[in-house]
Image (cartoon, helix red, strand yellow):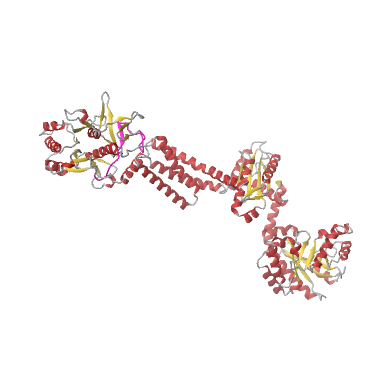
């Protein structure tokens, strides 16, 4: 497998694992759209619309407009309200002298307000004057227009209030039954102002849409923007406010009557006359109301100025009108932000970082929405915000649950989830006679070597590659989980033992193909343990943890037999595992309880036939199980690390015993005490210091101590081993290589080892008497010659017969050790043996 394939697998895993975030986003989007359809978000969406309106830059007063307002001071000066028809007639007459293009009277004049009614009617018949009336509807009775004015110069009051009483819409026209279309006051004023320039027409593309000059007036639908089930009254568009401060220049009606205005303010302009006094009922809430504490409501005449300015700016200046997306586009918009929240929560694990990312997402949403709003578009803001937050929080909670049951690297189920799946498999077998399943426990051989040599990133890539191959082998209904660093568990349903073994063989076959990592081919094998479940006799007592444990036990049995093997679990394996666990437990307490003792096996000078030293061999006297042989507990001590304190005790006890013998006997030459050092002992950084302390404590001469190390220990790291051996040699102790010939020593290194003795392994010595000058005799002869050439002496271990002894003497071997001379003896028996002064 190439690196690119591994990266592709990683991408696929991320894509698969991100699917829940996308599904959550889609679900939240559908729910929010449902809530929106029911009107649950309308008030919030309208509030967001108001906030965006207030954030827009102020465009200042429209130079085409002049508002003649009737203030509280005007009402008091004129002495009444409504003010008389005569005062209005005089105002019209004064304004007409300044040649306005259009005058819009934003005052109801359905009833005479004497004096001056006739004069007012005459003034209203001027061709540039537009009057206002109120349509009759089910909610309130209408207000008729002044008599005698043609329909083209009459416009209905177009204020449409949202449920919260705020004016956000501009009602352009209404189709009346059995009558022509009625236009609003602001539209009629605009039509009159633009009659000699441009007129509205129906869109050639959308028959029910009005195009007017540069503008396309997009009508609102029932669910446009943030609305839900909007009333379908007439042709409505969103009102785009020009300014929250001053939409047009304002003068009072008294200023007009007194002639205190500049004629240029009126000439060729649109003049609107209406009430601006707060005490009148002609005031309305707008998006600006929340920030206007003193006078939150806007007079109707200024609202008409806003509407009129919107129409003129769109038709003449090309200023954008509000547009809204169709419902399908809003669903995509909401869904996209919900998925953004889900993806961020899924990809970012750290709570603080996730919060920062979510905040950045919200800022991005607000920024994009504001940009769209500035460009004339109103898109939902609250629903995508809720989608982003709710999906993010929901996915974050789901991610915590997912992480609790899945491996972060591979996305596979972890141990807890696998045990749960295994429990369900066991439950499914109860009551079914022919349903079996298997658990395969897979451990990669020598995975630590790959991690240490190529790095953990490459190790992770290898694991991903192994997962890819495992997924290609197992069925879609089966489960593969990562239950440890390089451990995988596979649950295969509806399978017998033969099929499980066949699956293990296919896994081994799949792993034979080398993996290409960082341009280097890597070969991987696996040890596999198999445990069968679902057997009728066992289903009642089966537990998922026990089955996984059994497969794990079988895997260790396979690994003990060599790499790339599989084993099927049987009950004896569990018994051995339990025994081993008990052995480990007892071993940890044995040193404290002083359960260990030493036996001593002599080695003999083959020239004189006399004892010249002993090898100290540890034994374990268990209080319940009796004498436990070293071959049983030494490997366990090596694995658990208990060999280090045990080895130190052996060394100190052996030195102490030799010191006692030196006091008891008068030797012609000093006895040698030989002690084996384990690999873990040899790797201790303070080993030399510990040996020196023991020699000083026991008072033993260093020349009387021989330390034996096996070939494999020194060959693991030759240079370091040579350095340690030289430090030991600096203490004047003797050094020997144990079991020589069974390892893989390099002769070039052997010449550099500062050792005194080579010990020939008993496997060569034991076969010497079966042949005269055969292969094994030649090997021993060569080892002896090699040792002598390097200035070392030789000890042959495992001497059991006189024939072997004769052969060794004939080829010049100095020393022998074995049952022919004596078995390993307790200290008392070894003392008695020396006292008898034997000679062979």
Whether residue 482 is visible: no
Q: Residue at (67%, 53%) from the top-left corner?
A: 446
237 drawn magenta = yes
Residue at far front of view: 197
For the residue pair 561 and 662, the one nearer the viewer reads as 561
Residue 577 in view, yes or no = yes
Query: Which quarter of the rendering shows the C terminus?
Result: bottom right
* Above or below, 754 relative to 170: below
User: Residue 134: x and y, percent?
Assistant: 22, 32
Looking at the rendering, the stretch of residues picked out in magenta corresponds to 222-246
Image coords of residue 568 (percent x, y): 71, 45
Residue 438, quarter of the rendered image: top right
In terms of depth relative to the viewer, which is nearer, 10 or 480?
10
Examine the image and state in which quarter residue 589 appears: bottom right
Q: Is residue 543 left or right of residue 391?
A: right
Q: Is residue 819 above or below residue 132?
A: below
The main secondary structure of the magenta stretch is loop
Q: Percent x, y for residue 649? A: 70, 67
Give the side of residue 290 with respect to residue 497, left or right.
left
Residue 356 position in % (x across, y down): 44, 51
792 sits left or right of 112 in the view? right
Give the residue furthest to the left: 115
The reply to whether the magenta stretch includes residue 360 is no
Total marks shown come to 0
Along the line of sight, the residue nearer the viewer: 329 or 690: 329
């Amino acid at each position: 497998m190439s690196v690119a394939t591994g990266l592709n697998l990683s991408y696929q895993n991320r894509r698969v694992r991100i699917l829940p975030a996308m599904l959550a986003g889609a679900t939240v989007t559908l729910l929010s759209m449902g809530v929106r359809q029911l009107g649950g978000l309308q008030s919030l969406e309208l509030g967001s619309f108001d906030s965006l309106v207030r954030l827009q830059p102020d465009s200042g007063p429209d130079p085409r407009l002049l508002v003649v307002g009737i203030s509280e001071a005007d009402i008091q000066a004129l002495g009444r309200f409504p003010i008389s028809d005569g005062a209005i007639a005089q105002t019209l007459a004064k304004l007409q002298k300044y040649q306005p293009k259009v005058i819009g009277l934003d005052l109801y004049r359905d009833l005479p307000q004497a004096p001056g009614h006739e004069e007012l009617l005459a003034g209203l018949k001027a061709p540039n004057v537009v009057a206002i009336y109120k349509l009759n509807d089910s909610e309130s009775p209408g207000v008729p227009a002044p008599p005698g004015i043609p329909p083209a110069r009459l416009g209905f009051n177009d204020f449409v209030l949202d449920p919260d009483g705020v004016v956000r819409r501009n009602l352009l026209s209404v189709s009346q039954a059995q009558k022509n279309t009625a236009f609003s006051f602001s539209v009629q004023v605009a039509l009159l102002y633009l009659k000699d320039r441009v007129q509205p027409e129906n869109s050639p593309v959308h028959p029910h849409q009005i195009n007017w000059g540069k503008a396309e007036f997009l009508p609102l639908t029932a669910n446009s923007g943030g609305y839900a089930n909007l009333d379908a009254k007439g042709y409505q568009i969103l009102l785009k406010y020009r300014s929250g401060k001053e939409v047009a220049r304002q003068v009072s009606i008294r200023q007009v009557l007194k002639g205190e205005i500049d004629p240029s303010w009126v000439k060729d302009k649109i003049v609107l006359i209406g009430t601006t006094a707060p005490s009148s009922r002609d005031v309305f809430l707008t998006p600006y109301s929340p920030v206007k504490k003193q006078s939150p409501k806007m007079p109707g005449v200024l609202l008409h100025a806003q509407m009129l300015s919107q129409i003129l700016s769109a038709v003449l200046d090309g200023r954008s009108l509000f547009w809204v997306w169709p419902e399908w586009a809003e669903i995509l918009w909401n869904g996209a932000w919900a998925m953004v929240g889900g993806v961020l929560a899924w990809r970012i694990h750290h709570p603080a970082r996730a919060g920062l990312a979510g905040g950045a997402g919200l800022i991005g949403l607000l920024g994009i929405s504001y940009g769209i709003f500035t460009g004339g578009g109103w898109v939902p803001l609250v629903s995508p915000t809720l989608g982003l937050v709710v999906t993010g929080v929901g996915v974050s909670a789901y991610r915590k649950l997912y992480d609790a049951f899945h491996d972060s690297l591979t996305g596979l189920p972890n141990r807890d989830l696998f045990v749960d799946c295994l429990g369900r498999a066991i439950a499914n077998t109860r009551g079914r006679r022919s349903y079996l399943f298997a658990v395969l426990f897979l451990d990669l051989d020598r995975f630590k070597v790959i991690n240490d040599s190529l790095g953990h990133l490459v190790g992770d890539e290898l694991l991903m590659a192994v997962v890819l191959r495992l997924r290609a082998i197992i069925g879609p209904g089966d489960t593969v989980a990562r239950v440890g660093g390089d451990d995988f568990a596979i649950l295969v349903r509806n399978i017998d033992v033969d099929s499980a073994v066949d699956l293990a063989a296919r896994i081994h076959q799949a792993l034979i193909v080398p993996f290409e990592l960082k341009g280097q081919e890597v070969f991987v094998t696996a040890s596999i343990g198999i445990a069968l479940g679902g057997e009728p006799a066992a289903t009642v007592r089966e537990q998922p943890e026990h089955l996984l444990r059994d497969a794990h036990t079988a895997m260790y049995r396979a690994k003990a037999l060599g790499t790339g093997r599989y084993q099927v679990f049987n009950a004896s394996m569990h018994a051995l595992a339990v025994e081993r666990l008990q052995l480990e437990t007892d071993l940890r307490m044995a040193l404290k309880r002083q359960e260990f003792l030493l036996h001593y096996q002599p080695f003999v000078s083959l020239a004189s036939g006399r004892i010249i030293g002993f090898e100290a061999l540890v034994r374990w006297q268990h209080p319940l199980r009796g004498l436990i042989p070293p071959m049983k507990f030494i490997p366990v001590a090596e694995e658990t690390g208990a060999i280090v304190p045990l080895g130190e005790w052996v060394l100190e006890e052996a030195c102490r015993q030799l010191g006692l013998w030196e006091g008891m006997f008068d030797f012609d030459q000093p006895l040698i005490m030989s002690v084996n050092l384990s690999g873990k002992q040899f790797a201790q950084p303070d080993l030399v210091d510990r040996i020196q302390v023991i020699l000083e404590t026991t008072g033993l001469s260093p020349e009387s101590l021989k330390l034996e190390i096996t070939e494999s220990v020194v060959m693991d790291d030759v240079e370091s081993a040579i350095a340690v051996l030289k430090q030991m040699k600096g203490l004047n102790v003797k050094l020997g290589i144990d079991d020589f010939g069974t390892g893989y020593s390099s002769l070039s290194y052997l010449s550099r080892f500062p050792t005194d003795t080579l010990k020939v392994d008993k496997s060569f010595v034991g076969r010497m008497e079966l042949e005269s000058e055969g292969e094994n005799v030649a090997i021993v002869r060569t080892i002896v010659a090699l040792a002598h050439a390097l200035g070392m002496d030789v000890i042959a271990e495992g001497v059991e017969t006189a024939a072997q002894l004769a052969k060794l003497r004939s080829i010049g071997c100095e020393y022998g050790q074995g049952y022919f001379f004596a078995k390993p003896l307790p200290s008392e028996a070894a003392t008695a043996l020396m006292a008898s002064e034997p000679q062979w």
